[in-house]
Amino acid sequence: MEKTFAIVKPDAVQSKNAGKILARMEAEGFRIVALKKHSITKAEASGFYAEHKEKGFFSALVAYMTSGPVLVLVLERDNAIAHWRSVMGATDPAKADAGTIRKEFGASIERNAVHGSANPADAAREVVYFFPASELL
């Protein structure tokens, strides 16, 4: 079984879509290994998105991810990373396929409802960024 990391972002939590997104995760065959509601600090967001530090959108991304509570999760299933990325849809909800989470719940490329790890190395780094091993059940 493969694990991946996911975030239900501030816009989806604020608009009360988190429960619908969690239900979709389970309907897609994911087992929720870890889950917590969390307010990401500026330092956490800056570290988590450090690869984008030199990009023009970095400050706006940090501000957005610290604008309200999120749900951070570890998901597990066969082919978890690729499957979660498929279920999320394209980063830009306007370009996402019908039936994907971002198409249904995302408002813009900046406020696109969910995050998911891009590859196994990112998943490994992102899981431990928010969850100690003792919280992975």
Image (cartoon, rainbow, N blue to C red):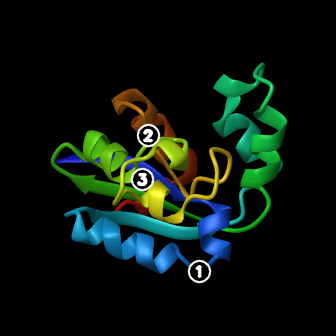
Relative to 43, is 115 on the left or the right? left
Q: Residues within 10 Å of mark 1 (few under 14, many from 20)?
A: few
Q: Which mark is residue 133?
A: 3
Residue 25 coordinates in the image, percent (x, y): 32, 65
From this view, report whether residue 136 is shown above or below residue 5: below
Residue 102 coordinates in the image, percent (x, y): 48, 55
Seen from the viewer's position, the closer of residues 125 and 11 is: 11
Residue 68 coordinates in the image, percent (x, y): 75, 66
Q: What element does badge 2 sit on?
A: loop
Q: CA distance from mark 1 to mark 3?
A: 29 Å
Q: Which mark is residue 117?
A: 2
Q: What element does badge 3 sit on?
A: helix
Seen from the viewer's position, the closer of residues 110 and 122 is: 110
Give the number of the mark in front: 2 or 1: 1
From this view, report whether residue 15 is shown above or below residue 58: below
Which residue is under mark 1?
A: 16
